[in-house]
Image (cartoon, grey):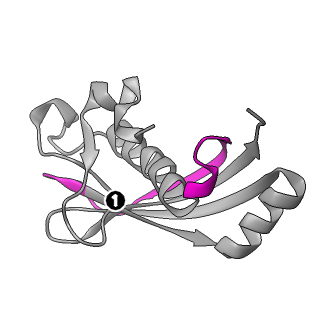
Amino acid sequence: MRIIDLPFNKLIGLSNSNDDGYILKLDEDIKYTNHIGTVHASALYALAEATCGEFLLTNFPEYKEVLVPVVRKAALKYNKPAIGRISSTAIITDDTKENIKEQLSSRNRAIIRLKVDLVDMNKVIVMTADFEWFVSKFNN
């Protein structure tokens, strides 16, 4: 599965970033703008949430076929008006990949906290989001 191929993500036009260090992107397009001509808050949220999914698939590939991630919490801060192409990064907070893998192996579930930054074309952070994911394994 590719995160950008999920129906909603395709609908809004998310794509993989070609820039080193970035995960996904939302290209510049008037269809993403709001009443003041900046990128709509909901488009930014969709990019951030999808970035988490792509990050989980990339960083836990051995669980790709059996992971069921569900967002439990999200806290967002819109820092600057977003204009143009927006790109994303993500990191794990409050834990390590090794500890998360151990939880998935021993308990078949884990709580994973991710921090996502969205940046504009000038690498200015336009939004920061903290996500808490409940991730469980199912047996095929």
For image coordinates 68% across by 59% down, the residue present is 112
Q: Quadrant of residue 110?
A: bottom right
Q: Is 139 placed above or below 76 here?
A: above
Q: Quadrant of residue 36?
A: top left
Which residue is at the front of the view, 77 or 60? 60
Tell me the amino acid under the disc marked 1.
Ile
Residue 116, given in percent of the width and then of the height, sits at 46, 62
Q: Residues within 10 Å of mark 1 (few under 14, many from 20)?
A: many
Q: Is residue 131 left or right of residue 82?
A: right
Q: Is residue 111 left or right of residue 92?
A: right
Which residue is at the front of the view, 97 or 49? 97
- Magenta range: 61-86
Q: Quadrant of residue 75?
A: bottom right
Residue 107, given in percent of the width and then of the height, sits at 89, 55
Q: Is residue 4 magenta?
A: no
Query: What residue does disc 1 label?
Result: 23
Q: What residue occupies the far front of the structure in this picture?
A: 140
Residue 105 visible in the current orientation: yes
Q: Is 80 placed above or below 49 here?
A: below
Question: On the rendered image, what quadrant is the C terminus found in?
Answer: top right
**Count of marks, rendered view:** 1
Residue 59, given in percent of the width and then of the height, sits at 53, 63
Residue 95, given in percent of the width and then of the height, sits at 70, 74
Which residue is at the front of the view, 100 or 46? 100
For image coordinates 16% across by 52% down, the residue present is 85
Q: Is residue 19 left or right of residue 91?
A: left
For image coordinates 24% across by 34% down, the residue present is 13
Q: Is 1 placed above or below 38 here?
A: above
Q: Is residue 76 left or right of residue 25?
A: right
Mark 1 falls on what kind of element?
loop
